[in-house]
Structures are given as C-alpha cells and as structure tokens.
Image (spheres, rainbow, N blue to C red):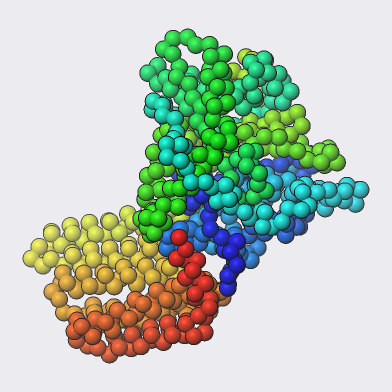
C-alpha cells in the first residue's frame, strides 16, 4: 500500500479494476472457501484464530473507496467479527457507499467459511488465508494436547511481497499483433428460470483423487482437461440441436508461470471449447481437442501477451483520465459482452496441502463462487476432490449430467447434502417496504388527478400534489439507496432539492424564491447537518473532508448568483457564501495535509 498521511491505501490491480463497477445483486463477485473439520466449530476460538491470521495478513483489513478516476483500497481498523452462519452463501460484501471489510468468516456446525470479495484477492490468496486460519484454530483448540504451531508459508515472505501488484511487475508493452485472442463462433448460452438473489444454487460432490487421475491418465491428459471435457458434454446434453458450440472459461494461476508471493489478484484465463457435430460424437475427440488447446495456450509467452494486452488498455493515457462515472457504464457493457463469449466456467484451485500433523482433524476443503452463469469449482485434499457447482439457474440438469457421466466412467461420486442453515431475508423486507412506498406515491398521484378531474375540473391543483409526491419519492429514494453514507446522501439531497426548487419556481411562474431563499437555506441546513453527523458518528478526517469540501464549493454558488445579479434578496446568499468560505479555510488551515492526501487518493489515475 502507498504510504501517505491518514489511512494507507493502494491502487486496485489490473484484474480487480472491473469488479467494483460490475458487481451487484446479479453477481456479487464473492467466493467462499471453506474447511470442514471432524468436530464442531467453537466460535470464540475461531475469533481468536481470525485475529491472529489478520496480524500476518493485514492486507485483508481494507475497505473499498471511490476516486474520481478509479476505485482504490484503503486500510481500515474496522473489527472483523466471527459469527454463526445465517445468510445465504456469497451475498454482497462490497456495498456501495458503505465502508465495511471485504471479507467475512462464519461457521456452521463443523464447517468454517471464509468469504471474500474478488477485488481483494484471488483464489490462491484466499486459500492461503484460510489455511492459516485453520492452522491457528487447530493450534488454539488442540495446542494443549501437543499439536505444534507449524508454518504454512515461507517465513521470509514480507508484507511487501504479499501486497505486490504482480500485473504491473511483469507488464511488458505488447508487440503489435501479439496477444490477440482466438476468435470462434458464438457459443451457446445456458438459459432458464433464475434462482434469484440470495438463492445461489449449490450442488457438491466428492470423488476419489486417485480414481480421477487414473481415468484422466487413460486418455493421456490432466484432470482439469478430463473434467473440462466431461463438463462440455454435460452442457451439450441440455442444448438445442442447433446449439453446437460450447465454450468454457478456465482461470489460470499466473504464479505458476511468473514467480510471485502476492496475495492480490494474479490470474489469467483460457477459453477451451468444442464444436459438437449434429450427430453422434466420441468423447475421446473432445478430450483431444481440449488438451491441444490447453497445450497451445498455457505457455508463459501466450499468457504474458494476454496479460500485457489488458495492462496496456488500463495504461491508455486517454482512458486513465476518463472520470469513473463514465468508465463504469463502459466496464459494465464490456463485461456483458465478455460473458456472452463463454457458456460456463471451470476453476481448479488445485491441491490443498496442510502439514501432516493437522490432517487428522480435517475432513475436507471446498470452494464455490457467485455467478450469473454456471461455474464448477474444485479443490482436493488428500484423496478427496470436492466438485462444487454454483449456478444462477433453478434447473440442476447440467449438474446431474456431469455426475452421471463421471459414474459412467467408473468414478464413484458421494453427493454432499445441503448444509446451509435457514436465513432471514432482511434485505428483501427493505426492498418490499420501498416497493410499497413507491406504489403508495403513485396511488396518491392517481387519486389526486381523478378527484381533480371529477369534482374540481375548473381548478387544476393536481400538479401541486404531483410535485409534492414526486419530491417525497425522490427524497426517500436517495435516502434509501445512499443510506450507507449520510454525508454523500446530504450532497445528493442538496443537488436534487435545489434543482427541484428551481424547476418548481420556473413552472409556477418565476418569483425567484428558489434562488433568494431555498438554495442558500438548503446549503446552510446541510452544512449544519454535516457537523452533527460527524460528531454523532465520530467520523475520522478522511471520512468527511471531501464532502465538506464539496458542500463548501456548492455553498459558494448562491454568492456567485448574487454577484451576477440573479438574486434579489441577498442576505441568505451572502451568509451562505461566508460560511462556505470559512468551512473551506478551516479545512486548509487545520487539515491541509490530510486534505491533500485525500485528494491524492481520490484523483489518482
């Protein structure tokens, strides 16, 4: 992280830059690693284990902040609290305008869960954290029985190594014509009824690693290639006859090709696929096609050129200076186009290795990730391979096909029963309230129009009711969607209400009250409320100074209007301008260094 006055912060790595713009209810970009022990979890011991783990990996104590050109991560002293599992898996961890940690640890019966937002780390970094957490828990729980405290990672790895941006480290300006991605026909897409927010469809099975390797070895390929071919067949069985192209996205851990100890994102991907014939096909043909693609694409040169191509896009001088509010729609659109290029995702985290002394206490490890599509994630521990499907769809036919094909190959599958507790749908209740409030506002407006037209057609008073109703709805909507940051809420309310007053004044026969009284009064009220909010919430300087600066700038506008002759009654405008000037002067004099540091973070490009 960059050292500066105030909180330490760091830029997002190349892969992480797209996540804050594209994550939400449809795809939270959260993945869960879990470890199931052979005994029930003690929550208090797990809390102590988490505190110890965070001492070794402080990079996880970060919150997402929004700058003018890019999002960034800022170090935080927020506590990480272990809790019993009560929410559906992989729910939102990054919530806009709320400063909260981007990971959580909870437990249910014998299972401890580590969920993390993808902008903070990738699968390799998350697994390293979970292994350290499991080790600390077991040592705390069984250290009195002689269980030793053994290192999980190399002792000479520094915090700087863990926080290193490996994308920037290995970036080379690509040669013209290199790094092009293989073009193929448009692949088929999985469709059907969606499971809905908070209802991620998780299906898990466990197979023998030795049996799986034996089946893959019979075709002369790796386990990942073999399972990719099986997944392609499982998907094709559910497609229409005209949908012949099935394409997978397979994430690749770049640390295997470029030495790195970074806990940040450092991954690429390849997109193997197969064009199924109209009639019968041989499984061996699929395996050979996928294996040839893996061998062609999994080279340091290929992966390096693809990585550099995306880094070059990020470093483009014009794109760097485009404001984030304009980048966001472009990133969302690019992400939607990228999703159309693949049918499903297969992610092999690999072997989870733990010291021999800890293995008798551990049943298995597992991983799955939120997705708007279908994703198969896998990891192995000792002789168990956990195959975890996460799907946004209600249908489980593809998952059934996949495990059925494995059984036909002679690979026994032990299905894992649903182990998620019942959850309380708090967010759904909030949404229901807002829906009813919106309907009530519409109903009030319609009733006003009906009464006006029937009983008092000669007097058109319904526009006043419509204006009041609209103002109420806008105020509550802003409060609802910006409720996590009251200062930002105040800035929005200032702009919306000021513009609303000007429009109301204009359409009801201009009298000038909106500029003479309303606009400066709103600014003064919001400035006063900022002081109260700051005091009550005990906000730190870096949490409020940008909003103070913004309201100070807005508060000078009434004075400018008076200077150019747009204001007839000037005393409120002069008072507002004077208070705004004093507010900004106080910021510069008493918090000048912190303000400069905060502006540097917000304006970095």
**Viewer-proximal residue among 115 and 162:** 162
Left/right placement of residue 53 relative to residue 332 reads: right
Residue 515 against residue 21 in the figure, above or below: below
Pinpoint residue 585: horizontal percent, then vertical percent.
Answer: 43, 85
Q: Residue at x 76, y 53 (%)?
A: 156
Quarter of the image where the N terminus is located:
bottom right
- Can I make out residue 109 in this image? no
Quarter of the figure with the C terminus? bottom left
- In the picture provided, is 238 more to the left or to the right than 580? right
Q: Position of residue 321 (x, y in %)?
A: 39, 59
Is residue 410 in sight in this rendering?
Answer: yes
Quarter of the image for residue 511 reads bottom left
The extreme left residue here reads: 458
Q: Is residue 92 left or right of residue 256?
A: left
In front: 127, or 531?
A: 127
- Residue furthest front as drawn: 175
Residue at x-position 51% and y-position 42%: 307
Q: Residue at x 36, y 77 (%)?
A: 553
Q: Residue furthest top?
A: 280
* Image height of 451 relative to 275, above or below: below
Which residue is depicted at the point 23% across and 77% down?
514
Q: Is residue 566 above or below residue 188?
A: below
> Where is residue 139 shown, x and y percent of the image?
83, 50
Q: Position of residue 268 (x, y in %)?
A: 54, 39
Would you say 128 lies left or right of 556 here?
right
- Count the labels in the image: 0
Residue toward you, 372 or 425 = 372
């Amino acid at each position: 992280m960059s050292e500066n006055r105030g909180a330490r912060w760091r830029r997002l790595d190349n892969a992480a830059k797209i996540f804050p713009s594209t994550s939400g209810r449809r795809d939270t970009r959260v993945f869960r690693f879990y470890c199931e022990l052979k005994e029930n979890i003690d929550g208090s011991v797990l809390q102590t284990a988490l505190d110890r783990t965070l001492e070794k990996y402080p990079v996880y104590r970060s919150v997402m902040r929004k700058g003018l050109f890019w999002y960034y991560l800022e170090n935080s002293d927020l506590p990480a609290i272990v809790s019993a599992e009560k929410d559906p898996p992989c729910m939102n961890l990054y919530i806009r305008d709320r400063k909260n940690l981007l990971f959580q640890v909870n437990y249910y019966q014998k299972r401890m869960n580590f969920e993390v937002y993808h902008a903070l780390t990738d699968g390799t970094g998350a697994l390293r954290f979970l292994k350290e957490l499991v080790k600390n828990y077991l040592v705390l729980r069984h250290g009195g029985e002689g269980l030793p405290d053994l290192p999980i990672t190399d002792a000479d790895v520094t915090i700087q190594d863990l926080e290193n941006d490996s994308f920037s480290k290995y970036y080379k300006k690509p040669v013209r014509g290199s790094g092009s991605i293989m073009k193929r026909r448009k692949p088929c897409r999985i469709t059907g009824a969606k499971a809905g927010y908070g209802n991620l469809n998780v299906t898990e099975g466990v197979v023998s690693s030795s049996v799986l390797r034996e089946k893959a070895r019979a075709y002369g390929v790796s386990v990942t290639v073999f399972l990719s071919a099986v997944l392609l067949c499982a998907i094709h069985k559910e497609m229409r006859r005209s949908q012949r192209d099935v394409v997978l996205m397979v994430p690749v851990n770049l640390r295997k090709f470029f030495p790195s100890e970074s806990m940040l994102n450092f991954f690429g991907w390849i997109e193997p696929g197969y064009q199924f014939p109209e009639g019968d096909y041989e499984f061996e043909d699929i395996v050979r096609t996928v294996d040839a693609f893996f061998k062609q694409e999994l080279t340091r040169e290929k992966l390096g050129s693809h990585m550099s191509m995306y880094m070059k896009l990020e470093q483009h001088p014009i794109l760097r200076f485009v404001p984030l509010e304009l980048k966001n729609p472009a990133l969302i659109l690019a992400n939607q186009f990228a999703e159309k290029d693949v049918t499903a995702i297969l992610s092999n985290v690999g072997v989870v290795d733990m010291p021999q002394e800890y293995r008798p206490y551990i049943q298995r490890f597992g991983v799955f990730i939120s997705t708007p599509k279908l994703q198969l994630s896998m990891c192995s521990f000792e002789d168990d391979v956990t195959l975890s499907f996460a799907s946004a769809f209600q249908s489980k036919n593809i998952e059934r096909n996949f495990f059925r094909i494995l059984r036909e190959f002679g690979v026994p599958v032990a299905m894992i029963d649903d182990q998620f507790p019942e959850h309380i749908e708090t967010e759904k209740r909030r949404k229901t309230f807002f829906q009813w409030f919106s309907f009530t506002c519409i109903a009030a407006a319609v009733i006003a129009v009906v009464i006006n037209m029937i009983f008092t057609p000669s007097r058109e008073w319904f526009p006043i009711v419509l204006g009041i109703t609209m103002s109420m709805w806008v105020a509550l909507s802003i409060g609802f969607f910006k409720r996590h940051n009251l200062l930002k809420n105040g800035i929005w309310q200032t702009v919306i209400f000021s513009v609303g007053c000007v429009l109301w004044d204009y359409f009801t026969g201009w009298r000038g009250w909106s500029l003479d009284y309303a606009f400066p009064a709103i600014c003064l009220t919001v400035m006063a409320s900022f002081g109260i909010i700051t005091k009550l919430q005990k906000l730190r300087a870096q949490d409020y100074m940008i909003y103070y600066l913004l309201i100070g700038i807005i508060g000078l506008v009434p004075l400018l209007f008076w200077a150019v002759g747009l204001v007839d009654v000037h005393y409120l405008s002069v008072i507002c301008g004077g208070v705004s000037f004093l507010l900004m002067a106080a910021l510069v004099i008493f918090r000048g260094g912190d303000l400069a540091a905060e502006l540097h973070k917000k304006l970095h490009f």
